[in-house]
Image (cartoon, coloured by chain):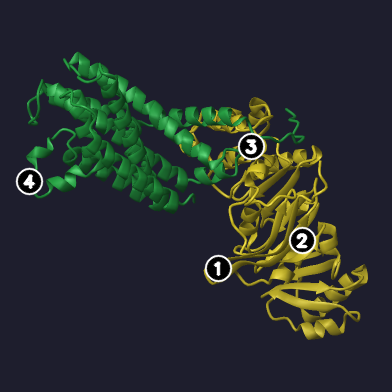
Chain colours: A green, B yellow
Amino acid sequence: MTTVDHSPRPGAAPVGRMLLAQTAFETRMLLRNGEQLLLTVVIPTVLLVLFSAVDVVAVAGPGKRVDFLAPGLLALAVLSTAFTGQAIATGFERRYGVLKRLGASPLPRWALLTAKTGCVLVTEALQVALLSAIALALGWSPHGLDTPSGALAVLLLLVLGTAAFSGLGLLMAGTLKAEATLAAANLVFVLLLLGGGVVVPLAKFPGAVRPVLEALPISALSDGLRAVLQTGAGVPWGDLGVLAGWAVLGLAAAARFFRWE
Amino acid sequence: MDAHPAVEIAGLVKRYGAKAAVDGLDLRIERGTVTAVLGPNGAGKTTTIETCEGYRRPDAGTVRVLGLDPVRQAGELRPRIGVMLQSGGVYAGARAAEMLRHTAKLHAHPLEVDALVERLGLGSCGRTTYRRLSGGQQQRLALAMAVVGRPELVFLDEPTAGLDPQARHATWDLVRDLRRDGVTVVVTTHYMDEAEQLADAVAIVDHGRVIAQGSPEQLCRGGAESSLHFAGPAGLDLGALTKVLPDGAAAVELAPGSYRVDATPLDPQLVAAVTAWCAAAGVLPEKLTVQRRGLEDVFLELTGRELRS
């Protein structure tokens, strides 16, 4: 029989190594999960290809159909990973005692949350690369990326959108039961997909509800991305402001109400 | 190594709403020992352990683990302790070996994962995801995660609950290895044989307090060393039986038809006296045994026999 020497030699790994290990591990768990991949990869890809090729939704603005759709589906990619995917995964980690057990490990809580953010960013980078490649193949001609301010605005929109959706997703995961999070996060995903300017222009909605829809983080993100990438407009300060507001609200509420057990 | 005891708890109180789960508990655990915390369900074992692990903030009293405050000095304490929760703690989609390898990466000088996997008999399920492992395999993985970082002090919360005998023995062997190598182990259990097999020290907890503490031998020494047990018809006249026994001997009906006779010394004459009385009364004593007093007897005497909800 194997003997193992258990004589104590305690110590935390260097925090950089822990962060890297946790980020890699969380990303591996996410990419292995079939339901998560459906949400983050399959649905945005299918919608992009389908609606670019088939005239079932009325698009708006200049350019081809794909020029309207690509920015919306980039926004959906951020929603699917930072909000829906993260809320569901974290909700079940909380339910199965994973967060509790990690709380007794050398990994500090801030490092766990940083690793979760890292996992979201890695996944989003993969999504953006995949969706952009498909959109370009479909004839997408994005504007605004040739100027530093346009490229910076796109990056800032993606980062603030990620922060806003992460705060809301963690708030849900840290307060509701895992099953409730699963149901609610999927419902919110569908509602925001339909009512957040992702594939349906907000101009199609009645004037009475439009101000409410325009204040949603998904609308700000899809509208902001479209302003730069479809029309080549300058920095969309209004949309950035809406996203920043949601990010502060969501992250503050998550920090206040999140329960680890 | 510093001179602080592994665990030092004084006057710990922890309330959930109006109910005190822990109510003035004192406990000192020396380094290098295996200590069993025994108690009925709801006695406050898990709350006490989780306070030591830094999960709960005491409402009153002090808790020091390796000389540190588990809440305020958590960052310093956590790398030095190993924790096995009562259940869960593993990503549902993680494979057993992969989860252990990841846990090892959070520590500076972890054990060699492959050797630990083999030692705990997890080799055959290394590529199986957690949710598909059997209950025993899940428990052993959680145990492996508690020790892989080479901690000084390990907390195991009911590590063998629901395990088959082979898996229980594998767990016990690992605990003995830990003691051999100088690791302090605190284990909660409600299996008496587990405490008798493993523990250098036993603390019996009930209603949120430690009601008895000592080595298993010390705890079993109080009261009668041995007793005579037999089964027969319910409702025998024990007053009549006691009259034929030496002074100081006592007979009780533990449950209908189940009898215990305590006497010091418990000698062959006593057995003869009991069987002679049975013969005269026309009673056939079944399952007649002379037993050394065990931890279970001590435990039941101290905590009572009524079931806890």
Q: Residue at x 68, y 35 (%)?
A: A11
Of discs 3 and 2, which sits in the foreground? 3
Which of the chains bears the disc numbered 4?
A: A
Whether label 1 touches label 2, CB < 8 Å? no
Q: Secondary structure at mark 1?
A: loop
Have a look at marks 1 and 4 and say if they share a chain.
no
Badge 2: chain ID: B
Question: Callout 2: 10 Å neighbours few (<14), some, many (20+)?
Answer: many
Amino acid type assigned to the residue bearing label 4 in the image: Pro
Do circles 1 and 2 both sit on a common chain? Answer: yes
Q: How many angstroms separate mark 1 from mark 3 (CA)?
A: 32 Å
- Three-letter amino acid code of the residue under disc 1: Ser
Give the residue at mark 2: B295
Tag shown at residue B309: 1
* Residue B193 visible here: no
Residue that mark 3 sits on:
B144
Identify the secondary structure beneath mark 2: helix
Where is residue A70 shown, x and y percent of the image?
Answer: 20, 25
Q: Earlier in the sequence, mark 3 or mark 2?
A: 3
Query: Which residue is depicted at the point 81% across and 44% down?
Result: B2
Q: CA distance from mark 1 to mark 2?
A: 22 Å
